[in-house]
Amino acid sequence: MKPKLEIKNLHASVEDKEILKGVDLTVQGGEFHVIMGPNGTGKSTLASVIMGNPKYTVTQGQILLNDEDITEMPVDERARKGLFLAMQYPQEVPGVTNSDFIRTAIQARTGQTVPLYKFIMEYDRAIERLKMNSDLPHRYLNDGFSGGEKKRNEILQLLMLKPNIAILDEIDSGLDVDALRIVGDAVNSMRSETFGCLMITHYQRILDYIKPDRVHVMMQGRIVKSGGIELIEKIDKEGYDWIKDELGIEDERVIIEEENARPSLLGECATRKALE
Amino acid sequence: MYKDSQFESLKNKQSIHLETTQYPRIGKIKMENFAFDNIKTSLVKEDKVSELPDEIKSKIDDFENIIVFKDGNIIYTNLNENFNSIKITSLFDALDNNDQEVLSLLEEHLQTLNDDRLVTLNKTHLNSFLYIKVPRNQIIKETLKVYILGSRDLAHMTLINLETNSELTIVEHLESLQSIRFNYISETYVKDNAKLNYIAIDRLSDNTTAFIGRNGYVQNDASLVYALGQLNDGNTLSKNHIKLIGRNSYAESRNVLFTDKDNTHIVLINMEHLAPYSVGFINNHGIVKDKGYLFVDGVGKIHRGMNGSNSQQSTSIINLSDEARVNANPYLLIDEYDVNAGHGAAIGKVNEDQLYYLMSRGLYKRDAEKLIIFGFLTPILELITSENIKTSFINTIDKKLSDD
Ligand SMILES: Nc1ncnc2c1ncn2[C@@H]1O[C@H](COP(=O)(O)OP(=O)(O)OP(=O)(O)O)[C@@H](O)[C@H]1O
Ligand SMILES: [Mg+2]
């Protein structure tokens, strides 16, 4: 069956600050979508909310996975239903080995115990494919990993868990040219009718390996423009100003610092000076 | 029934001393409630067995190179020839053989008066005694496993002597076969350039109230590493006092502390630097659950003139429940300026970002929590040399984590 992720008019906030302000998006099996956008426009927040990070509250709208409403579902259940998020900043978990972790995850996902031998074979093969060190299974999860190693480890988990819908948040940031090719090829090899992918990126480079079907631009917590591959080329050459001009956006960020915080502080200082 | 008059009269002297000694004062905890004084001991001799009864077998994780010590008697030994050079003796053996070496050490021990009421109680009621000596230059590569079991109230003392240049790794288990009162002390001497790894796993059952005092004396260039797993199911007062008495001596006290149900566990650790260039580490990893109360005091003390010493201490505790309580106090008492020292304590819940990360791959919350907790305990689990014992230790914690 072709998987399908649907986002409908999604609003979400953290600590009473609204960050997502009405996102609509559909990703189906066989499709690769790209989200671009300047810093602080809500891309990672969108990824986290789709995955079910409990820090964020959905205030309006819906997330559907294969026509099932998962808006209120806990993160682990979403993962077991085939959703995956490669994080922009993967967490370090000292003391937990990569292999214990990924094996437990596969068992949770499939509901079956994985024979150790079969698991080791498959894990070693995936590690080799991503040109990672062979001692990786015994190292602690992302503990002391370089930026690039952490990103590769996210993709390694992707290969092992074989999700139906994957969101990759800046998987290309911090990778050298060779690593970029290895990761790009690995992700591209997942392409099939039973796999849909949403990639967040700032760079055109990764797209040398992965050809997206749709490109979206995020600003102010919304998707403000969608198009084909030509959109990326234009952004790469000209930046985002032309989109802002076109849409009449002055500040693309979601949260804009309040300007009057400083003067009130100054005022306080002045008062104290006067008292002295 | 034994009636060695000299031995009994020494114990009597201690019982007179008991009238003037007090319990240690620990926060607002009422030590009287532990009712350590209710201990009633007797000396009962038992024969060796060639086959352990099932009840005891079930408490044993590893049958290689073990001694089973029950109610003061060595009831079972299975040691290979590598242990031939070590001396292992019980009180009964010493009395039977009129072993002057051991009896005079015991006499000296019983003659010494101590201000601590719990130690005095131990001496007054002593009915279980184990002596282990590794002679000079003997390096024992394999691990010695000692199971100390009690089916009646026990006032036990283990005396360990590592002579100059010797080495040993010992795993000591405390287990109760009934609800008993357990008053335990060990005195460990690590002589010049000797090396002892001392792994202790305390797994006393429900309703067993315990005092466990482990004292270590570390001489020149010697090393003593304690790895203590305190998993008792009853109220416990546990003390670990290490005296670094030799130059360039080294000691660690690494502890896994698990306090659950409605138990109170008091853990006092004291690293005392009594020689220059001595190095001491205290490292506590605690988990509290249900309505448990864990009280941890760690003291690193460097005396005047002990230059070049290094005293480090860290405590981290995961609190899994809203009803559990934790009190952790790291102290550094330093009377010398040319030293290196540091301390810290952190108490918190399971790290939420780590939990989210693991769960985002499909792990059930419970499994994710367990992985994180075992990850947190890894620095201590790594010190357990026997795979069987490590597995059983992990299983015990696993079971405690799963119990609601
Ligand atoms: N947990 C949070 N707590 C407070 N503010 C947050 C939180 N998460 C996101 N924000 C804020 O929401 C805004 C959008 O952040 P987000 O990380 O989604 O941006 P982004 O588009 O991914 O940016 P970048 O390209 O830099 O990765 C930022 O102003 C950020 O500070
Ligand atoms: Mg981001």
Image: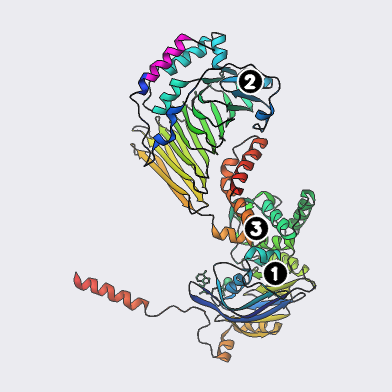
B366, A211: nearer the viewer: B366
Label 1 marks a residue whose chain is A
User: SS class of the residue under badge 2?
Assistant: strand
Residue receiving disc 3:
B364
Left or right relative to B15: residue B151: right
Foreground tag (1 vs 3): 3
Q: Quadrant of residue A199?
A: bottom right
Label 2 marks a residue whose chain is B
Please state which amino acid type lies under the numbered disc 2: Ile
Residue A24 on the magenta span: no
Classified by dominant secondary structure, the portion drawn in magenta counts as helix
Please state which amino acid type lies under the numbered disc 1: Ala
Marks 2 and 1, Cα distance to the nearest angstrom? 62 Å
Residue receiving disc 1:
A166
Q: Is residue A27 placed above or below B111 in the rendered structure?
A: below
Ligand 2's quadrant is: bottom right
Sequence-wise first label, 3 or 2: 2
Please state which amino acid type lies under the numbered disc 3: Tyr
Question: Magenta region: which residues?
Answer: B1-15
Residue receiving disc 2:
B75
Residue A209 in sight from this viewpoint:
no
A204, A211: nearer the viewer: A211
Label 3 marks a residue whose chain is B
Foreground tag (2 vs 1): 2
**Residues at marks 1 and 3 touching, judged by CB atoms closer than 8 Å:** no
Marks 3 and 2, Cα distance to the nearest angstrom? 45 Å
Marks 1 and 3, Cα distance to the nearest angstrom? 20 Å
Left or right relative to A114: residue B69: left
